[in-house]
Amino acid sequence: MDLPIKTHPGGVMLTVRAVPGARQAGIRGIVSGRGGGVALKVAVTAPPEDGKATSAIIALLSRAWKIPKTAFSLQGGGAAREKTFLIAGDVDRLFQSLLPHLAGL
C-alpha cells in the first residue's frame, strides 16, 4: 500500500488533498494524488481563503496525531487543493507514530 508520507532529512513530507468548506472536518482516507502518487484526503470546515483551510488542516492533524502544530510547515501548494507539508522531527519516530494512523485508512 502506498502511503502519503516520504522521508526527508528534516522529518517526513506529507501530501494532503484538501477539502475546504466541508460540512464536517476529518481525515477521509488515502486517495490518488497528482503524478501517480497518493495523498491524505483531509476535510475542514474552514473556507479556502487567506490560508484558513491550511491552518485548519494543521490544527486537525496536530490534534489527531498528537504532534505539535509547530512541527508542521507548508512546503508547496499554498493556494492549491493538493498541499505538501513537512512534519519536522526524527524520521524513525515520526514513521512509527504515523503508520498506525495511516494503515487503517
Image: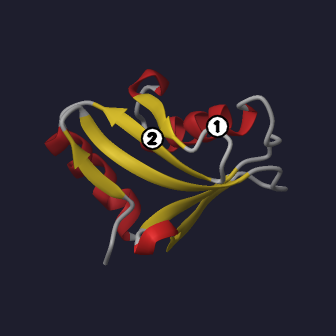
Residue 100: quarter of image: bottom left
**Residue at the spot of label 2:** 85
Residue depicted at x 29% and y 58%: 99
> Quick check: 49 above or below 80?
above
| Nearer to me, 8 or 98 | 8
Q: In this view, does 28 lie to the left or right of 73?
A: right
Residue depicted at x 33% and y 73%: 2
> Quick check: 100 above or below 11?
below
Q: Which residue lies furthest to the left in this view?
A: 92
Q: Determine crowd level at label 1: few under 14, some 14-19, many 20+ residues with C-alpha closer than 10 A.
A: many
Q: In this view, does 3 lie to the left or right of 81?
A: left
Quadrant location, the N terminus = bottom left
The CA distance from mark 2 to mark 1 is 10 Å
Element under disc 2: strand
> Quick check: 82 above or below 60?
below
Q: Which amino acid does label 1 sit on?
A: Thr
Q: Position of residue 90 (x, y in %)?
A: 18, 33
**Residue at the spot of label 1:** 54
Q: Position of residue 37 (x, y in %)?
A: 41, 70
Q: Position of residue 89 (x, y in %)?
A: 25, 30
Q: Can residue 105 be seen in this view?
A: no
Q: Which amino acid does label 2 sit on?
A: Phe
Q: Is residue 34 left or right of residue 46?
A: left
| Nearer to me, 86 or 44 | 86
